[in-house]
């Protein structure tokens, strides 16, 4: 009798286990919880940032990629949600052929119902493709190809407003070549619908959904910033600038309706370009500025000229994000500027003490 | 000629048999609506358009004055909801600027969702074939309470250059939305035709087809190349609550 009772208890136990009754249901979580890499080939990781919103993992090393020889092979050390699987496998070595290369990971939950894709990039103390030598081909909203800065769409840190203006086959930000050197030209342009569109170049992402939902707010599509933890003292770059002929202010006749047309007012004065640099600490929705610099100028600079902008630190806290934005018309976000204003940028460098 | 005379004779005799017994009637009605808004000219509607009208309840009250054995006049006050979802594949569908100085074109899958809530006041005439069957026709005026017309372009391409969208390979990768909620007019007028069938002393079944005579958009709306007119089929049951001879 006792044997029968014991058998029944055991059967009940295993039945519960099979159903998940005692162990609990299989997890539906599919997240990367921790990510770093083993030091190798001069890449010594010092900081990792997992960007759940965008499905990105960035591992930073206190090196300059110019001092490393690519390709480099790295073995990631990854932790994922309980019971989740990951491809490539946890122990697999991955290869980076160049500093902008990336590896795609897919995490699948224990219950097999959810999966999430991540891209893994490596970063040094500088900004990737800061010399604007690499450009990839993007397809615009009009099905036509155009160029964007970065070697790969998936890993580039540079963003422009070209996708938004591709409806009009107009691209405010473009590649300019001088022999073997490549730099970026940012122009304030006009389209059939908009009397003035300031070209844009910034570190971050262009949010097409934001542009569609807020067609009368050019700034709404700019998601500024990338994960960054270092504390540079300054930003140095080369630039030239020429203002457009006529400074204008375009005002929507019917605020909120891009198709309602604009009133255009000619203004006295000269257009000016604007550059904004910020180190921020972002914790959830809270953003605090660690260091910032805003630079505006209307002065024409015909030849590419070096400029160094020292950051003004307001806090000793550790930054989590960095952004730099360039615009040939500083007030372009409010449809103020001069069509034809042209800002050329090359060799952006972060300066450390 | 003799045949016409014969038909007329039988017709008049037939209707005479089913004379109305009361002068005034007051009724409540309950039914369902099904319909939407169709592009005019109809040539603007692509062949592969797929519409999914939603059945929505209607509710109302009706007064009727019986004139003689064959004719009655009536008026009503009723609440209606008209809802329809539609999907259509479009090539270079134009959305014009208010001043029509330029257009944005879309090629791809276009989805629309329409819902109109309104109070309708029809003025009707009844012609009684017999004691059970009658023809109803008339005109209506409706006051819009809430209107929603939202469209979404998916898996397509958008361009201000029609050449791009004429030749773009589909499906595309772009999605967009156009919202016409603020462009809907606050009233509608049109005509109706239908039937009424008496199933009991105080119960009638009815069915009607309503067609709008004006665009559902405000008069200065010219962002698209066509108008849209309301059409609706309604059916339901009326309960005569009160009569007076």
Image (cartoon, grey):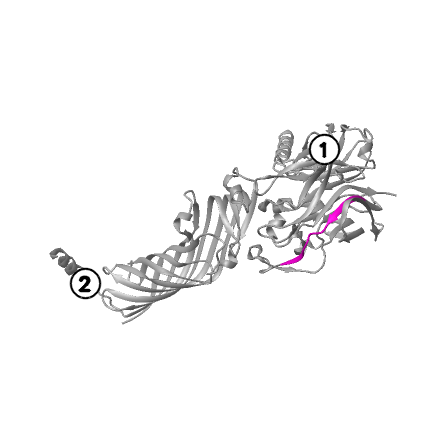
Q: Is residue A293 above or below residue A140?
A: below
| Residue positioned 65% across, 55% down in the render | A335
Foreground label between 1 and 2: 1
Extent of the magenta region? A236-250
Q: Position of residue A157 (x, y in %)?
A: 72, 41
Instruction: Give the alpha-carbon distance from disc 1 to disc 2, as whole Å.
Output: 92 Å
Residue position for label 1: A101
Res B7 → quadrant: bottom left
Q: Position of residue A207 (x, y in %)?
A: 65, 46
In contact (CB < 8 Å): disc 1 and disc 2: no
Q: Position of residue A101 (x, y in %)?
A: 72, 33
Q: The numbered mark 2 sits on a residue in which chain?
A: B
Q: Position of residue B10 (x, y in %)?
A: 15, 59
* Residue A352 within the segment the image draws in magenta: no
Residue position for label 2: B17
* Residue A239 within the segment the image draws in magenta: yes
Q: What secondary structure characterizes most of the magenta part?
A: strand
Near-viewer residue (A21 or A216): A216
| Residue positioned 50% across, 41% down in the render | B166
Task: State the SS at label 2.
Answer: helix
Task: State the SS at label 1.
Answer: loop
> Can the viewer see residue A187?
yes
- Farthest residue in the bottom direction? B245
Res B199 → quadrant: bottom left
Near-viewer residue (B4 or B56): B4
Q: The numbered mark 1 sits on a residue in which chain?
A: A
- Farthest residue in the left direction? B2
Q: Is residue B13 above or below residue A347?
A: below
């Amino acid at each position: 009798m006792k044997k029968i009772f014991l058998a029944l208890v055991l059967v009940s136990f295993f039945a519960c286990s099979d159903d998940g009754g005692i162990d609990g249901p299989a997890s539906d979580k599919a997240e990367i919880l921790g990510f770093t890499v083993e030091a190798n080939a001069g890449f010594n990781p010092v900081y990792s940032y997992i960007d759940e919103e965008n499905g990105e993992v960035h591992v930073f090393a206190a090196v300059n990629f110019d001092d490393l020889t690519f390709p480099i092979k790295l073995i990631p050390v990854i932790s994922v949600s309980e019971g989740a699987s990951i491809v490539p496998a946890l122990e697999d070595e991955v290869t980076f052929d160049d500093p902008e290369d990336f590896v795609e990971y897919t995490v699948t939950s224990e219950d097999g119902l959810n999966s999430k894709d991540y891209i893994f990039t490596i970063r040094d103390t500088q900004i990737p493709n800061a010399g604007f030598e690499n450009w990839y081909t993007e397809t615009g909203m009009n099905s036509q190809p155009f160029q964007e800065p970065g070697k790969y769409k998936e890993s580039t840190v540079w963003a422009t407003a070209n996708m938004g203006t591709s409806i009009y086959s107009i691209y405010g930000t473009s590649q300019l070549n001088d022999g073997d050197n490549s730099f970026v030209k940012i122009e304030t342009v006009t389209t059939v619908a908009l009397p003035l569109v300031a070209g844009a170049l910034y570190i971050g992402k262009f949010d097409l959904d934001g542009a569609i939902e807020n067609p009368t707010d050019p700034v709404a599509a700019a998601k500024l910033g990338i994960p960054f933890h270092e504390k540079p003292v300054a930003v140095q770059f080369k630039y030239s600038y020429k203002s457009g002929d006529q400074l204008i202010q375009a005002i929507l006749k019917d605020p909120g309706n891009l198709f309602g047309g604009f009133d255009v007012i000619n203004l006295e004065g000269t257009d000016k370009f604007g550059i904004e640099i910020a180190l921020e600490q972002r914790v959830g929705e809270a953003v605090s500025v660690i260091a910032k610099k805003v630079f505006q100028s209307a002065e024409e600079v015909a030849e590419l000229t070096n400029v160094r902008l020292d950051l003004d630190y307001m806090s000793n806290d550790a930054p989590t994000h960095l952004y730099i934005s360039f615009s040939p018309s500083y007030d372009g976000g409010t449809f103020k500027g001069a069509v034809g204003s042209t800002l050329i940028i090359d060799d952006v460098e972060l300066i450390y003490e | 000629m003799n045949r016409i005379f014969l038909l007329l004779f039988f017709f008049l005799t037939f209707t005479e048999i089913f004379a109305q017994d009361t002068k005034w009637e007051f009724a409540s009605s309950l039914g369902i609506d099904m319909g939407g808004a169709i592009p005019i000219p109809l040539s603007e509607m692509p062949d592969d358009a797929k519409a999914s009208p939603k059945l929505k309840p209607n509710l109302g009250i009706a007064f009727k004055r019986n004139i003689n054995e064959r004719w009655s006049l009536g008026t009503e006050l009723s609440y209606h909801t008209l809802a329809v979802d539609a999907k259509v594949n479009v090539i270079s569908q134009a959305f014009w600027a208010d001043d029509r100085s330029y257009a944005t074109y879309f090629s791809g899958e276009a989805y629309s969702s329409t819902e109109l809530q309104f109070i309708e006041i029809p003025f009707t005439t009844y012609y009684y074939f017999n004691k059970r069957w009658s023809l109803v026709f008339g005109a209506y005026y409706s006051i819009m309470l809430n209107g929603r017309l939202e469209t979404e372009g998916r898996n397509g391409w958008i361009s201000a250059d029609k050449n791009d969208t004429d030749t773009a390979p589909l499906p595309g990768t772009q999605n967009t939305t156009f919202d016409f909620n603020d462009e809907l007019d606050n009233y509608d007028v049109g005509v109706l035709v239908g039937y009424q069938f008496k199933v009991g002393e105080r119960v009638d079944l009815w069915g009607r087809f309503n067609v709008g005579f004006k665009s559902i958009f405000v008069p200065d709306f010219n962002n698209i190349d066509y108008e849209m007119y309301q059409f609706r089929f309604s059916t339901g049951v009326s309960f005569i609550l009160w009569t007076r001879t």
